[in-house]
Amino acid sequence: KTGFLARKSHADMDGKKTPRGKRGWKTFYAVLKGTVLYLQKDEYKPEKALSEEDLKNAVSVHHALASKATDYEKKPNVLKLKTADWRVLLFQAQSQEEMQTWINKINCV
Ligand code: I3P
């Protein structure tokens, strides 16, 4: 599964609220491959290696839980991802259908 997703970090690996200045939205081209959600600056090109930045932004979805972010009302089509290492990330998909597909795919990993 691939597609554009905007990401907002809500909580960090220690489970603490992501500090101000690091809570903004940023759009990525997302690629779910195995148990990793790659968040790339640019659209995926098979011939291009992942940059250091891309690797840093990758999120393990192994033992993670995705659900609709029902408590977040500022934007539509937002899902919440809780990772095994206590991060909480919000992702805005481009449609309701896309959001549901991402949730299903992530939870089936
Ligand atoms: C954040 C940024 C986010 C905003 C967040 C701010 O500032 O403006 O867009 O979330 O509010 O802290 P910064 O880029 O300096 O980290 P929303 O878009 O959801 O309002 P928050 O702290 O209430 O999450």
Image (spheres, helix red, strand yellow):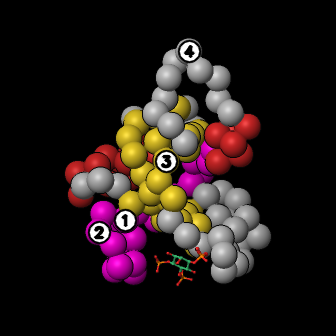
The amino acid beneath tag 3 is: Phe
Residues at marks 3 and 1, CA–CA distance in whole angstroms: 14 Å
Vertical side of 44 occupied by 14: above or below: below
**Residue that carries the numbered disc 1 in the rendered image:** 78
Q: Earlier in the sequence, mark 3 or mark 4?
A: 3
Outermost residue toward the top in this view: 47
Q: Position of residue 29 (x, y in %)?
A: 46, 42
**Crowding at mark 4 (Cα within 10 Å: few <14, some 14-19, many 20+):** few
Element carrying mark 2? loop
Q: Are marks 3 and 4 in contact (CB under 8 Å)?
A: no
The amino acid beneath tag 4 is: Glu
Q: Position of residue 46 (x, y in %)?
A: 52, 18
Element carrying mark 3? strand
**Residue that carries the numbered disc 3 in the rendered image:** 28
**Residue that carries the numbered disc 2 in the rendered image:** 76
Q: Are marks 2 and 1 in contact (CB under 8 Å)?
A: yes
The amino acid beneath tag 2 is: Pro
Quadrant showing the N terminus? top left
Q: Residue at x 73, y 64 (%)?
A: 13
Residue 100 showing in the rendered view? no
Q: Position of residue 98 (x, y in %)?
A: 28, 49
**Residue that carries the numbered disc 4 in the rendered image:** 47
